[in-house]
Amino acid sequence: MTDETARPDTGGATISTAPRQGDGPDDAAVERALRAGLAEFDLAPEDEALLSADGVVGGDETPQGPLPVVAVVGRPNVGKSSLVNRILRRREAVVEDVPGVTRDRVSYEGEWAGRRFTVVDTGGWEADATGIHLRVAEQAEIAIDLADVVMFVVDATVGATDDDEAVVRLLRRAGKPVVLVANKVDDQRGEADAAVLWNLGLGQPWPVSALHGRGSGDALDAVLEVLPTVSASGAYAQGGPRRVALIGRPNVGKSSLLNRLAGENRVVVDNVAGTTRDPVDELIELGGKTWRFVDTAGIRRRVHQSRGADFYASLRTQTALEKAEVAVVLVDASEPIAEQDVRVIQQVIDAGRALVIAYNKWDTLDEERRHFLEREIERDLVQVPWAPRANVSARTGRHMDRLVPAIETALESWDTRVPTGRLNAFFGEIVASHPHPVRGGKQPRILFATQASTRPPRFVIFASGFIEAGYRRFLERRLREQFGFEGTPIEVSVRVREKRRR
């Protein structure tokens, strides 16, 4: 809880105004009486604005049609992610001067000359790939199948390699429009290197420097000439479904869980920690609803301690969390709960997102490990007893059906608004039975309380004096006992106001 001013509610989805207990005439009378009593106290303009606002409700997001899709493909380290960043005009895709940084197909929304489209960054395609590199190549092939136009990126300074020739054969089989991009042409001297790529038989090579932006506009103009108005596949449709972020430390099974839920190998999975670098979106049907799940890079350490690609991956994980509505934090149940697990959970709370904790790899646990895990939860996760829990196995699919009820419970609590009359009647009962301790001969009174916003629920208490941290925690605990709030952090701030001087 904090003493800072609560933010007004500007949320997107409809706010639940139905109280969990009745808001009867007695509650309304209590509210009127307490509001009238506030007239004796000095109130700031923001106090007046908060008190006059009566639960402003934002409208639902309007789902958008499927934007046309442009897939950026090529062999490793030709500058695909740099080109994606150039198209987006911001550093969104993870870039580092080593091959194999991008591993999944990752979609972003781009715009050029007034046309909006989805850009899909892919991992490097190699003809003789094995292990994790084979799965990266498979994701690139799926991206081609789902695209409306393909930007095929070749390193002009190296020229066409055997792998480039293999990509050409793949593109011809796919039958999609192709714009050939000759990257790393940083000045006019490289134009001749680009011209050699006519030999690939894909039409005009467009000389581009993704690093400096040279020629990128001409290449995008060529894309727009063959780009349809809407996507034929609709695989990257935006908006609508509730957004769920899968987060956790590296190698706890986030990508495996997403693949299990999607029913396909949507993201690259490997035993090597840190396989995922970019957030990966996927629309998934679960429990009769469509959800937008986002797989994220594992949170290794604090962002400022990360380096290179891990640093930018950490930033993108934080951004994905900010865009999500609920976070499913995966914890490896087969290992002791780590400090990183606790820090990830705290990151969700700090972001104000609904929270579900999923204990993965449950199929590997014996009775002894389950006993010790319960003790670890009681000791290390004592600050989140309100978070719904699901014991799952991404490998076997065990208890996947328990995720949706947990997510729905957390989101319902995240959206809940308590009527002002009921809230003040509740605080009146609490203060009457458990008044604030007297300190220095003074006993602060709770004058009035209101819920300033939802997502997460934020409450503001007007008081005649300072309320101790221990009593605030007591009030928060009783709020949860009375109104539920299972799966959501709640914030309670206190505004101390003095009586007007006559």
Image (cartoon, rainbow, N blue to C red):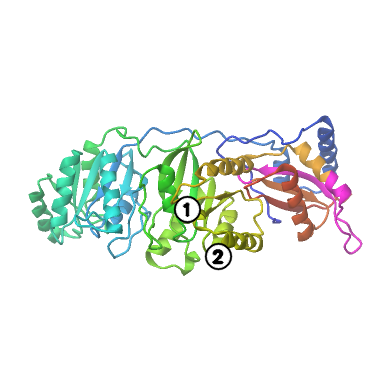
Q: Residue at left 71%, top 51%?
A: 492
The one nearer the camera, 376 or 170, is 376
Q: Which residue is mark 1?
A: 319
Q: Residue at left 64%, top 62%?
A: 375
- Whether the magenta-drawn stretch holds residue 277 is answered as no
- Residue type indicated by callout 1: Thr
Q: Quadrant of residue 112?
A: top left
Residue 93, position as x, y percentages in the image: 36, 55
Q: Residue at left 43%, top 40%?
A: 284
112 sits left or right of 496 in the view: left
- Whether the magenta-drawn stretch holds residue 448 is answered as yes
Q: Residue furthest front?
A: 367
Mark 2 and mark 1 residues within 8 Å of each other at the beta carbon: no
Q: Quadrant of residue 472?
A: bottom right
Q: Residue furthest top?
A: 25
The one nearer the camera, 335 or 32, is 335
The one nearer the camera, 217 or 16, is 16
Q: Is residue 48 visible?
A: no
Tell me if residue 284 comes above or below residue 94 in the rendering.
above
Magenta-highlighted residues: 429-456
Mark 2: which secondary structure? loop
Task: Give the numbered dot on residue 336.
Answer: 2
- Residue type indicated by callout 2: Pro
Image quadrant occupied by the N terminus: bottom right
Mark 1: which secondary structure? helix
